[in-house]
Amino acid sequence: MVKEFTKSITIGISTSALFDMEEAKQLRAKYGAKFYSDFMVENENVPFRPGYFFDVINTIKHINETVGHKLFDIILISRNNAWTGMRAVKSCHHYGIPFSSAMFGNGELNPEYLKAYDINWFVTTNAKDAEKAQKIGIASCTVDPNAKGVNISEQIQRILDGHISPEKQAAIVTPAEEKASLLRNQFNKKLHVVWDLDRVIFDGTSDDVYGAHGLEKYRQYELEHADTPMADGPFAPIARILGQIAGHFQEGHSPIITTALTARGDEATLRAMHSLRDKGILFDGELHFMGGKDKDKILSIMKKSPDHTVLFLDDSDRTIDMTKGIVTSGLVPKQQGSFSIGDDKKKAGEAASALAAAAAKDAVIAPKGTPANDGKAKAPAVKRTPK
C-alpha cells in the first residue's frame, strides 16, 4: 500500500511544550534556581503531566509505528541541565514517547544548534526562541502551555502561597495521584494539519501591501498579480513534504491530512490557488477562504471528527487566542517582507520589487496633498488582515 519514503520531518520540541512544567517553573520564579533544581531531582521519578503539544507528538508516534517508517523524527530541546532535565527524559520513557536526540542547553538557546541537529520544525513555549530559529530558516511556532488549563496540585499551591518555607524543600514531593489531563485521552489515528497561508505557507509581501496601502489597493494588487506566485513562507517546505507523504497512500487512507484555512477571499483567492499549484503544494483536505471572517467556528467543526488530532498554525495573535482552547494551535512569528528560503530567494526579490511598484503606483493615484476620498468624510473601515 505504501511506496518507499524518501523524506521525513525532524521536529525539535521544547520539553515545556511536550510536558506540563508550569508547577516547577512557578516554584523557580518564586524560590530561585537552587530550590528548583533540588525539587526536580527529588521528583525525577514522578512523570510530568502531558503538556499542550503532547497529543500531537503522541499521534505522530502512533503514525510512525503504524507505517513502520519514521515519517517524523523527534528531538528534545530543553533549557535545563543534565540534572534537572532527567525528569523530562524519564517522562518520555513513562509515556513511550521516542526521541532520537536531545539537547539540554542549561540556559538560553543558541538557534544554530537546531540546524546542527537538522531540525526543520521547531515547537516551543518561548516566543524569542521561535523568532531566533525562524530568522535562520527553521520553521517555528510558539504554543501557550496554559491554553487548555493547568491543574496546580494543592501541595504546590501551598508552596506558592508561602505556607511551606524554602528550608523545608527536602520534604516536598509532587503527589503521585494527579488530575487527569484534558489531552491524555484524546489521541487519535490521524494528524490533521490546518495551515494559514500568508506568512505561514506564503511570504508576507501581500500582507505588507495591505498594511501599507489598505484593503482596496491590496485587492487591486492581488488582481494584477493573480498569475504571479508568491514566495515561500516558513512552513512551505514542511507543507510540501506532508503532501508528498500523503501521496504515498491510497486515497482516503493517509494518516496525515492537510487543510488551508485563510482569511483571503474574493480578489485574493485566485492568486493563492495559483501559488499553491506553482509550489506543488496539494492540500488533500479542504481549502477555506474565509473572506476576513473568524476561523474558530471552522476549527470547532473540524475538532468533532473522532479520528483526527487537529493542529492549527497561524501568524495572528488574535486568531490564536481564539483557537488555542479549541484545537492545538501554534503561533508562527511574524516577519516583515519576504521570507527567503533556498531557490525562492529570486521569487522573494521579485515580490519585493512588485511591492515597490505598488507603492509607486499609489503615489501616482493619490499625489501628496490630494485627499484620497475627494474631500468626502467617510467612517473608518474595520480592517481584517488577509491571510
Image (cartoon, rainbow, N blue to C red):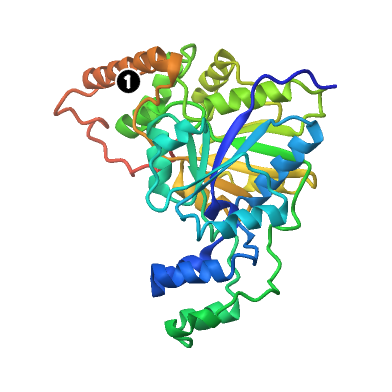
Q: Amino acid at mark 1?
A: Leu
Q: Residue furthest left?
A: 369
Position above or below: 145 against 197: below
153 or 308, nearer to the observer = 153
User: Quick one: quadrant of the N terminus?
Assistant: top right
Horizontally, residue 325 falls left or right of residue 356, namely: right
Q: Percent from the top left, x then y, of residue 121? A: 53, 35
Q: Which residue is mark 1?
A: 355
Q: Position of residue 75 (x, y in %)?
A: 57, 41
Q: Quadrant of residue 88?
A: bottom right
Whether residue 10 is situated above or below residue 282 in the rendered picture: below
Q: Residue at x 38, y 41 (%)?
A: 110
Count of residue discs: 1
Question: Is residue 194 depicted above or below 16 in this figure?
Answer: above
Q: Quadrant of residue 310?
A: top right
Q: Is residue 346 left or right of residue 373?
A: right
